[in-house]
Structure formats: C-alpha cells, structure tokens
Image: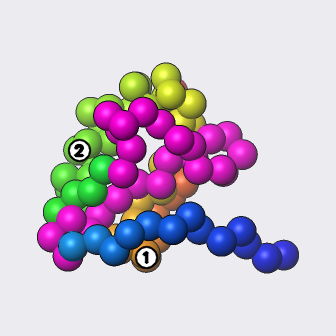
C-alpha cells in the first residue's frame, strides 16, 4: 500500500519547528479557519499547551485527531480529540 503524498509545507524556521496535523475521522487532513490553521510552535510543550487550550474549537471545526510533528518527523499521534 502506498501512502498519499503529504501536502506541501513551506520550510519552517528552526525556532518554530513544532506543528500539528489536524485530521478527520478517516485520517485526512482537515482545513480549518485561519485562526487555527498552520500554527507553529517553538517547543513541544508550547504545541501541547496550544492543542490543550483549543481542542474543543478544533473539534467544532471537524478535527477528530491530531498528530504532532517536529519539522517533518512525526513525534506521536494520531491522538483523538473525542471525549
């Protein structure tokens, strides 16, 4: 089975290397409003704090799971946002 190519992401400055891929129930990436899209963080803790603060709003936008990346390396996930 071949994996679908990831969408293009512009290079990230090293000080903002942590980001979340926002997924729906089928594992597809979700497009969300600009308030939540393309967030980048200086540390893993900052990224985790952000998703902990905004998970309910993300769920309202159709996000059911998140995957944490450092640059292009998957750190963990998918992690469900469902209660």
Disc 1 or 2, which lies upstream in sequence? 2
Quadrant that contains the N terminus: bottom right
Where in the figure is residue 57, as x and y percent of width and height? 39, 25
Where in the figure is residue 11, as x and y percent of width and height? 34, 74
Q: Secondary structure at mark 1?
A: strand
Let me know if residue 65 appears in the view. Answer: no
Circles 1 and 2, Cβ within 8 Å, touching? The answer is no
Answer left or right for 82 relative to 51: right
Is residue 15 shown above or below 61? below
Taking the magenta stretch, the answer to whether it contains residue 61 is no
Task: Tell me the residue that label 2 is attached to.
Answer: 49
Which residue is rendered at x = 47% and y = 54% of the image? 21
Highlighted range, magenta: 14-38
Residue 35 is drawn in which quadrant?
Answer: top left
Point out the frontmost of discs 1 and 2.
Answer: 1
Which residue is rendered at x = 29% and y = 71% of the image? 12
Task: Tell me the residue that label 1 is attached to.
Answer: 73
Is residue 11 shown above or below 68? below
For marks 1 and 2, give the CA distance.
19 Å
Where in the figure is residue 25, as x and y percent of width and height? 67, 40
Residue 73 is drawn in which quadrant?
Answer: bottom left
Magenta span main SS: loop
Where in the figure is residue 60, as x and y percent of width and height? 49, 23
Which residue is rendered at x = 27% and y = 57% of the image? 40
């Amino acid at each position: 089975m071949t994996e679908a190519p990831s969408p293009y992401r512009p290079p990230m400055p090293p000080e903002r290397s942590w980001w979340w891929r926002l997924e729906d129930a089928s594992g597809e990436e979700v497009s969300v409003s600009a308030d939540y899209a393309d967030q980048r963080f200086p540390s893993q803790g900052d990224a985790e704090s952000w998703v902990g603060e905004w998970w309910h709003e993300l769920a309202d936008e159709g996000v059911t799971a998140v995957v944490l990346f450092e640059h292009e390396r998957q750190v963990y996930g998918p992690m469900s946002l469902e209660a």
